[in-house]
Amino acid sequence: MTKMWIAIAAMVLMFVCNIMVVYSRKLQSGAIRFLLKSVAYLLLLITLLMILLVIF
């Protein structure tokens, strides 16, 4: 049951990362764009760890 909640949280984080990257592509400012993309990729790494936790 716990693994199911971790998997759902990982899917939500992937969706949030996707929205952040799409939104950052529409911005003109380089600093905010870089910050949003950096946070999105860090969240993707956390998501990867969560997926690995669910698989093994």
Image (spheres, grey):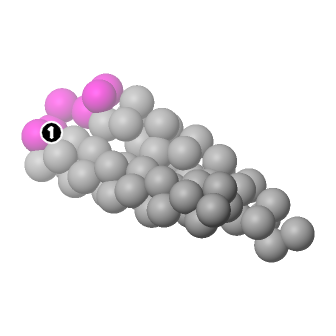
Q: Residue at x 46, y 45 (%)?
A: 17
Q: Residue at x 40, y 30 (%)?
A: 22
Q: Give the quarter of the image for residue 29.
A: top left
Q: Is residue 5 left or right of residue 36?
A: right
> Can you give x and y, in whole percent of width and height, for residue 42 in the image?
33, 58
Q: Give the quarter of the image for residue 55.
A: bottom right
Picture layout, residue 14 above or below residue 4: above
Q: Is residue 38 left or right of residue 47?
A: left
Picture layout, residue 3 above or below residue 27: below
> Can you give x and y, in whole percent of width and height, for residue 4 in the image?
81, 61
Q: Which of these two is toward me, 49 or 29?
A: 49
Q: Give the quarter of the image for residue 27.
A: top left
Q: Quadrant of the N terminus?
A: bottom right
On whether residue 22 falls in the magenta region, the answer is no
Residue 9 appears in the picture as rendered? no
Name of the residue lying farthest toward the left: 30
Which kind of residue does numbered mark 1 sit on?
Ser
> Can you give x and y, in whole percent of width and height, for residue 37 in the image?
28, 45
Q: Which residue is mark 1?
A: 29
Q: Is residue 15 left or right of residue 26?
A: right
Q: How many marks?
A: 1
Name of the residue lying farthest toward the top: 26
> Can you give x and y, in whole percent of width and height, for residue 7 in the image?
71, 56
Q: Residue at x 63, y 62 (%)?
A: 56
Q: Which of these two is toward me, 20 or 5?
A: 5
Which span is picked out in magenta?
25-30
Q: Secondary structure at mark 1?
A: loop
